[in-house]
Amino acid sequence: MTHRSTTPNIDLSGSWQLASVDGEIRTAIMLPGDVHTALHRAGLIPDPYFGRNEEKVQWVAEREWVVERSFTLQEVEGDWYLDIDYLDTVASVHVNGFLALEADNSFRRYRPDVSSMLKSGDNSIRIVFASNIAVGAARQKQQPFYIPYSTGNSPIPDGNMLRKPQCHFGWDWNIAIAPLGLYGTIALKKLETARIEHVVTRQTHNNDGSVDLKVTATLFSKGPDIAQVYFDLDGERVRLDVGVNGETHVNHLFHIDNPRLWWPSGSGEQALYRLSVELPTDEVIKQIGLRTVELITTPDAAGSRFAFKVNGREIFCRGANWIPADALFSLSSPEKTEDLLQSAKAANMNMIRVWGGGFYEQDHFYDLCDRLGLMVWQDFMFACNLYPSTEDFLDNVTIEVDYQVRRLSSHPSIVLWCGDNELVGALTWFEESRKDRDRYLVSYDRLNRTIEQAVKKALPGALWWPSSPASGYLDFGDAWHADGSGDMHYWSVWHENKSFDNYRSVRPRFCSEFGFQSYTSLPVIKTYAEAKDMNVASPVMELHQKNAGGNERIAGTMFRYFRFPKDFPNFVYLSQIQQGLAIKTAVEYWRSLKPHCMGTIYWQLNDTWPVASWSSLDYGGRWKAMHYLVKRFFQPVAVAAIPSDDEKTIRFSLVNDTLADVSVDLSISLLTTQGERRHLRDVQAVCSPDAAVTATSIDVSDIPEGTLLAWRFTASNGTGGEGHHVKGTYKALELEPAGLTVTHEYVEENGAVDINVTAKGLALFVMIETETDGKYSDNAFDLAAGESRRITFTPARPLDRGALPEFRFYDLYSCQSAD
């Protein structure tokens, strides 16, 4: 969405002066921006992400801060207002010493009238930020009863008292520094006749294939007047002259005879229309996609379904959970966000879940999802805590929800509005709510009902889901372990330390969270740790691991499946391989259950800072080993080897998420530890559209000890792939040296590097790494004896031809061998 104003206005973004309220500290700050980054750039605090500096910057959030600047205004006649959003969080705004605004919700837009405060010539604007920590503590004391928060996630207390990103107070993957600042618009605008508050659309898809698009513009004027309103849809333009007074709704209906429909990625094109609503002095531009979406929750023998239907077709959702792109706003950018979302699409995803402990993202995020065909599951911003249900808190939430739904509802990518993340489960996490569940359940229901009513008022017909996970509407059961209905968060493998095959003990209808940790890649670790810290038990590495027991679980899992790695770099490498194997085990089995299961959204896509976590993309956007595996196991047409419950047979599941019949040529072989490939069977299999079938089965007794089952396939839609399956554990294999040889050359035409890797023996999970930022055409791949693979490395920035990167190579044998 673009909001343009042609009235006299002053963009107040740019350089401001930042000071502590006591005047001890002074420096410059760029707005939009955050206080911590400004202090770091001025040399007043160390880099919060480096070493143990998180501990050294805690004082910043404990103090009050003020930002101010001056501006010149020649003409003060008329009605003037400030336009402010993403103001984080409890802040007062003063114009020429007059109080213009008291804000306490970073998820709202504020437009206070400041006409009487302005003067001709020089003016000043001042924003005073209260300490989030102090305000949270004060508000907790004002509650009629104590409202618990997740101390395991948030070492900074009482963040649940404030309407700001909950992960700012720490999370089990986030730095805990409670940032503050202003991250969006800050402008002074003149109101002439009227301004546009919101533009909301509703679609009616008719039986004859045509679409009626109802556009509702909400206008605001100070008094009675006549406004000229122009509605334009891809060049079809109409003018309406309407009477306005206060808040006025203006409707226009566009009839589209032959609509181009918007489809999720992989299911069709992402057709978009340009919609604009204009006043002589104001304009809102949106991109609109025409589509229908339904959530299918019909009862069946197992419980009830949970499936998305777009344009009449059920879509299997392949995706990941999104958290804020950076812990500090000033270090994020639209370009970095685009890189992360492009990586999601490149890994064959069609859905992103915007998780409820971060932000309602900025407009450019959803515009990108529209263009990329990434469906958005949109949580409201409540996560893992309990929350107040006092009248003032709920009134604040109502305004927040109304604004966000009206702002975002026209995006075709948004397919679901979900009330919160894990608040139902949180009722069982705290001593207070366990002792008095009824009180806290009623309090939760008031909040959840407030959100639901505000959604349905702002967007009648919105697809609403009360919480994630949830077994159903008004079902407060255990959706972490019950798999028959609704969406599930399945965390038993990580948090309960179950084996990877435990993923095959449940049959989710839709799994919206499941994950396994790894370390961030070595080049990223080097940005925050010195050589002396390169040990998983060092204080620096432990500070960059926010999940209690996480390092022990990573190491313990290695003992379960692998021989222990020989040094720290290989420990990091192997942690990423086992992470990928964990998620691969879950996804391949759950996809094979289609249509019983219709979605796998793993935790998590990205990182907010350099940290050990469940992400498949490093902080900065590099692909971990897992993301290369994701690209394979999320292919619309995929083949997977899945052991039976009694482990006597292995079935080859063929999944087809496309619209057409697919035939597959599957070649199955045995791999010896010397890398010899012994042909076992060729299979041809056919799978109908949107289905999963068993292509063939292999008796485990046909796999000799010390060999691996391997396969390659080509599909009639032009895709293909390969894989291997180990009977038992990798540590039981007597692997031999892979004998990798490597050549590489610079490609003049595109500035990439072609890398040719050849193996003399068996090379499992060959991983290429370099300090130079960039992406590989493939990685974490297997080679048998005598096989080669050509990999293209595309650097993030142009290379100096005479200074090619130094590449490191990992494989499973060399990782575990001291040779």
Image: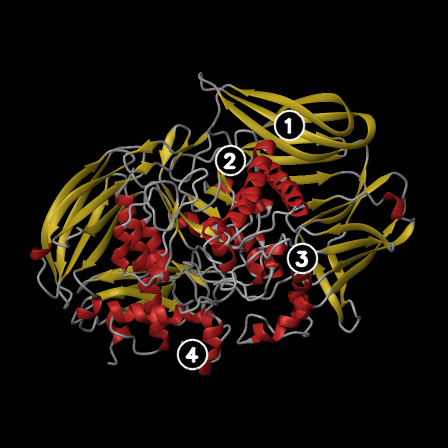
Counting residues from the start of the chain, the first of labels 2 and 3 encountered is: 3
Q: Quadrant of the N terminus?
A: top right
User: In this view, which residue lies farthest toward the right?
Assistant: 120
Q: Are marks 2 and 4 in contact (CB under 8 Å)?
A: no
User: In this view, which residue lies farthest toward the bottom?
Assistant: 532
What percent of the width, then of the height, locates residue 79? 85, 39
Q: Amino acid at mark 1?
A: Thr
Q: Amino acid at mark 2?
A: Pro
Please state if 239 lies on the left or on the right of 313 as rendered. Answer: right
Counting residues from the start of the chain, the first of labels 4 and 3 encountered is: 3
Q: CA distance from mark 1 to mark 4?
A: 58 Å
On the question of residue 76 being in view, the answer is: yes
Counting residues from the start of the chain, the first of labels 2 and 1 encountered is: 1
| Residue pointed to by mark 4 | 534
Q: Amino acid at mark 4?
A: Met
Q: Which mark is residue 216?
A: 1
Q: Amino acid at mark 3?
A: Arg
Q: Secondary structure at mark 4?
A: loop
- Neighbor class of circle 3 (other Cα within 10 Å; few <14, some 14-19, many 20+) is some
| Residue pointed to by mark 2 | 412
Mark 2 vs mark 3, foreground winner is 3
Choose top left, top right, bottom left or bottom right for residue 14: bottom right
- Neighbor class of circle 2 (other Cα within 10 Å; few <14, some 14-19, many 20+) is many
Q: Which mark is residue 139?
A: 3
User: In this view, which residue lies farthest toward the top?
Assistant: 208
Q: Secondary structure at mark 1?
A: strand
Choose top left, top right, bottom left or bottom right for residue 693: top left
- Name the foreground residue: 247 vs 733: 247
Q: CA distance from mark 2 to mark 3?
A: 38 Å
Please state if 568 lies on the left or on the right of 474 as rendered. Answer: left
